[in-house]
Amino acid sequence: MHPIPRFWRRLGWLLPLLCAAFIPLAPRPDYAGLYRDAPHLDVDTRREGDSLRLYLRLPAPARLGPGHALRLTAWPSYEAKYPLWQDSIPRRRQHPRPTADGSVRLSFCIAAARVPAGAILELRTGPAEAKDDYQEPTTTAWLRLTDAQLTRPFVLTDSAGLPLLRRYVRAGETFGVDCFGLYQPIHWKRYAVTPTPALPPMTNAAAMPAGPRVLPVLDSAQTRPGEPLRFAGPGLYALRVGGNGAPLSRTLAVLVAANTYPALTTAAELIEPLRYLTTSKERQKLTDAPDPKRAVDKFWLDIAQGNQALGKDLIKRYYGRVTAANRLFAAHKAGWLTDRGLLYVVLGAPPSVRRLFNGEERWFYPDGSLGGGPITYTFRPRPSTFAPDYYELVRRPEYELLWYAAVEKWRTPPTALTGQNVPTDPRDR
């Protein structure tokens, strides 16, 4: 055997570097599209032995087949330049199942060894020619895989046995727990939680009240394997599947919300989100009114200075944002109560969003400062057993004037003073 010449040995070391230099870098995505108030591609997972099963719901009108491949990309982090791997899931592995509402359910498995904890999965079902940096919520979803998610051997299902694909249920709604393998008993606990609204972005972090270290348990019970669940009252529940010596005992927190969640219907539900714009005395006056719902309408009509078209538009925009925040940011409490919900409701959906290597999110508003220039808000991940996807706003004193100016825009909209037409383009809002 002849020894390999030194020149070729050196070239062997250089080849991987030379090849990498010619691989195009992935475009840095802007995640703002995923926060649009629009139908979303929903995703959930279940561990099945050596595999990880992914469940998808494509909103109507769902399009699959030629030209609309299901593409899966694994990234080591949100800011990674190169993916861990890319794959296209053939139709025979997707098990498509159309539903009555026009959406389509998909389900497929990948080897769990291919996705280490902390990896980011990107799923796309749009046309192959779509721009990789464009985040269309109906065809794109991102999923950060935690240890708990990679090992949880069950998924929540609706009354028809289909994956629920959300972390909240409505009071009185029947749902189930579909386990891989043998059905396991389900232990549940209801915790005493007082949902607190997010504080303004200029609040001193040192002055913010600390949450309790341990949540008191109000009640608990165990159900038989395979038995449906139904909780009559709202609250925070924890479901533990398995136990009694079972090797795969896992816990999942579930928010049980009011019957119409994420929408708002009662007078109390309409008054509470006004705390971001009003004083406690104003809200108490609305609550004590003979007809609180009519009082809420009058509150907005007074802001519009009697302009009924503007008043209706303000109501539609404000509570539309509250509903969207409930849908997007539901955690251990309603979405509008979270830090991201706070900014979403008052400032609107962020025009630009970046996700960093350390898990932070940065929301950019190009004209959010007092002088009309750009402003950035940073959210840091604060996961917990009850809220694994929770983010906390980095509060700063310099936000104070900006915040009061944003609130003042709601309290004295320009169209109420100038008589201009109410904007109808969402980009003008």
Image (cartoon, rainbow, N blue to C red):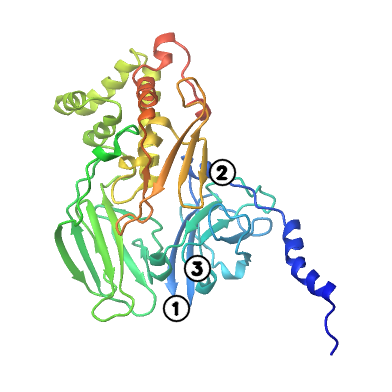
* Residue drawn at the location 23% of the way across and 74% of the way down: 224
Question: What amino acid does circle 3 point to?
Answer: Pro
Identify the amino acid type marked 1.
Answer: Gly
In x, y percent, where is residue 317? 40, 29
Label 1 sits on a secondary structure element that is loop
Q: CA distance from mark 3 to mark 2?
A: 24 Å
| Residue picked out by circle 2 | 30
Judging depth in this view, the residue of 4 and 35 nearest the camera is: 4
Q: Earlier in the sequence, mark 2 or mark 1?
A: 2
The secondary element bearing badge 2 is classed as loop
Residue 43 x %, y %:
46, 58
Q: Name, please, the residue furthest toward the bottom.
A: 1
In whole angstroms, how far apart are the C-alphas of marks 3 and 1? 15 Å
Which residue has dot 3 on it?
A: 116
Q: Which mark is residue 49?
A: 1
Which image quarter: residue 264?
Answer: top left
Q: Residue at point 50% right, 35% down? A: 364
The residue type indicated by label 2 comes to Asp
Residue 186 is left or right of residue 120, and the answer is: left
Left or right: where 32 falls relative to 269: right
Assess whether mark 2 and mark 3 are in contact (beta carbons under 8 angstroms).
Answer: no
Residue at image point 64% right, 56% down = 68
Query: Distance of mark 2 from mark 1, alpha carbons?
Result: 35 Å
In x, y percent, where is residue 230? 24, 60
| Residue at the image position 52 percent from the left and 50 percent from the top | 60
- Image vertical order of residue 128 relative to residue 16, above or below: above
Q: Nearer the viewer, mark 3 or mark 2?
A: 3
The secondary element bearing badge 3 is classed as loop
Indicate the position of residue 159 as horizontal and vertical percent values: 33, 62
Q: Nearer the viewer, residue 266 or 361?
A: 361
Q: Quick one: quadrant of the N terminus?
A: bottom right
Q: Which mark is residue 315?
A: none
